[in-house]
Amino acid sequence: MSARQARLLVWIALLLAMPVPLVIVGHGRVPVGTLVQLSAATLGVAILERADGAVGILAAVLLAQVMLWTVVSWLVARVVVRALGRVAGRGAGAATVALVTAGLVVALVLPIYRSPFHASRARQTLLEVYG
């Protein structure tokens, strides 16, 4: 696996599973993919209705968060892949796959996310966040 492929794999895994702060609609930690879903829904409302008032502000803040965390996760992926390349050498591809798999298993099994949208299930796993 090339460094570029490894970086892309880590970046996509981070976008799908890395908990990031959600600060506009209450405090929580959700994956960037959830922020993308919220942004798309808010933009849909803004386009169909009007983007003035709270809807426009909410859409702008959510899109800014998506852009920020997309760049941050890309930088984290670069650092992780570079470090794995130095530590594992020729086995960096296998180490990358193992690291991504372990991270996704943790996200699927442990409730590491905090959702401000569910009072009864504030702590959630990855499947519960997207489900």
Image: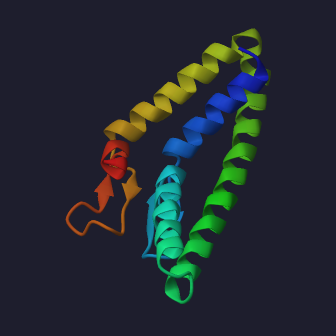
Does residue 23 show up?
A: no
In front of the other: 60 or 3: 60
**Residue at figure coordinates x 47%, y 28% from the top left:** 102
Relative image position of residue 12 (x, y in whole percent): 60, 37
Q: Nearer the viewer, residue 19 or 56?
A: 56
Residue at 33%, 46% in the rendered image: 125
Q: Quadrant of residue 99?
A: top right
The percent coordinates of residue 119 (x first, y second) are 24, 69
Q: Is residue 1 above or below residue 71?
A: above
Residue in the image at 53% along x and 47% along y: 18
Q: Position of residue 112 (x, y in %)?
A: 39, 50
Answer with the quarter of the image where residue 86 lies. top right
Q: Is residue 37 visible?
A: yes
For image coordinates 61% across by 59% down, the residue present is 66
Residue 89, x across and y down, in percent = 77, 14
Relative to 61, 102 lies left or right:
left
Q: Nearer the viewer, residue 49 or 18?
A: 49
Quadrant for the N terminus in the image? top right
